Amino acid sequence: MASRPQSTPAPDAGGARQLPRSLGVLDSTAIGLGSMLGAGVFVVFAPAAALAGSLLAGAVALAGVIAYCNAVASAQLAAKYPSSGGTYVYGRIRLGEWPGFLAGWGFVTGKTASCAAMALTFGHYVAPEFATPVAVAAVVVLTGVNLLGVTRTALLTRILLAVVLATLAFVVAAAILGPHPAAPGDGAAAAAGGWGVLPAAGLMFFAFAGYARIATLGEEVRNPARTIPRAIFAALATAFTIYLGLALLLQWHLPAEQLAGSSAPLLDAVTSSQLSAGAPVVQAGAAAACLGALLALITGVGRTTLAMAREHDLPAPLARVGGTHPVPYLAELAVAAAVLVLLLTTNVLTVVGFSSFGVLVYYSVTNAAAFTLSERPRHAPRWLNVLGFVGCLLLAATLPPASALGMAAVLATGVAGRYLVLRRRLRRTA
């Protein structure tokens, strides 16, 4: 009989302390779904509708297809290499150090900015006049929760996810009850579509990227070969069903111009319905969504930082694991510090495209790494990896230029920095 996974961490071959395996299918699925049903579900439909017009559902479907390709690749790799770090680890093992670094650096930088955006969005929903102080407080509190251990993180994520799902059910009920304006609208919103589906799908992909958190927590999952694939597909299928249903419902319920120009489309869907008195419910749900996404983001970025520090692609002290409930506490604190700096110095409300570009690069490496696997389940043919790789690069290339160029510059800076560090190390050993 196979022995059960140890509940306490043990040193790895290199002497570094490992994280305990304490997450099952339910917790892992909740963390992935909580990440996908974050603040993006409350805002991303508007800019996507402005680009795709009446083809919004098509943009959601296209993003879902690419997300499925990426999920298949992630599930294969995470089951084979159940270690913290996700594609950073897979890229290093299957493709080499540089592709792995590119994936890890893109994930850490893009998602750190997303953490700041989620925190600030929470602040705007809770107390618009004091958005930044509230955002800072949220980051501090949620970092404290993460430092108590991943099981506490999973428990709070389940609670927040329940609130978000209840809120979305209320939005659906309000939209169905109507009234439903018959005029489809004209002008820019109605004329959008066609090639606009591609950048719209790129923006929608921002909302699908949460299942990466399941893979980055691979070191803390029980029976990873079974748990990780099930959790990834369950989270993705649930999120896709919700997003596609909401896209169709919003287009049916709101005029095209209102949907495309809205800063809070789900809130508009309620305020223009017979249940308009329930607007505070949507605001509370959006706040919970922000907290859930922020909690999962901080956790995922911290684990990738841990993995990169273990390989000396980031400062080695960030790999330290400790505490009563072992966590990478220095990595968690470093991520929190970076988020706080962004909150206090930068307006980060426009980072959806920026983050999408970084995540699409990340998943292009995932698909390339999965392509090299020889042992493959029947549901994961190689052509699916090719489709995912090409799809990721296509969506990244069609994102708004400012987002693509900004993230490309960040990636180039990271590559140049690593190159200089490696040259210095070679000189020291010469």
Image (cartoon, helix red, strand yellow):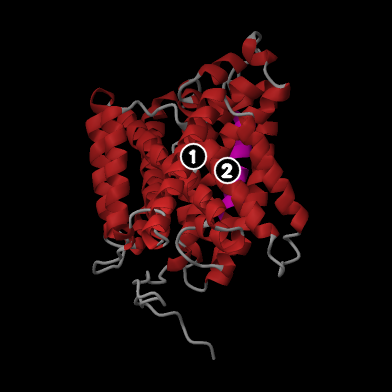
Considering only vertical position in the picture, is 100 above or below 345? Answer: below
Locate residue 250: give its quadrant.
top right
Range of magenta residues: 235-249
Q: Are marks 2 and 1 in contact (CB under 8 Å)?
A: yes
The quadrant the N terminus occupies is bottom right
Where disc 2 sits, the SS reads helix
Task: Say whether residue 197 is left or right of residue 290.
Answer: right
- Viewer-proximal residue among 416 and 325: 416
Identify the disc placed on residue 411.
1
Given residues 410 and 217, the one toward you in this image is 410
Residue 182 in view in this figure: no
* Magenta stretch: helix, strand or loop mostly: helix
Locate residue 145 relative to residue 118 in the image: left or right.
left
In the rendered structure, which amino acid carries the disc numbered 1?
Leu
Of residues 292 and 303, which is closer to you in this image?
303
Q: Position of residue 259 (x, y in %)?
A: 56, 20
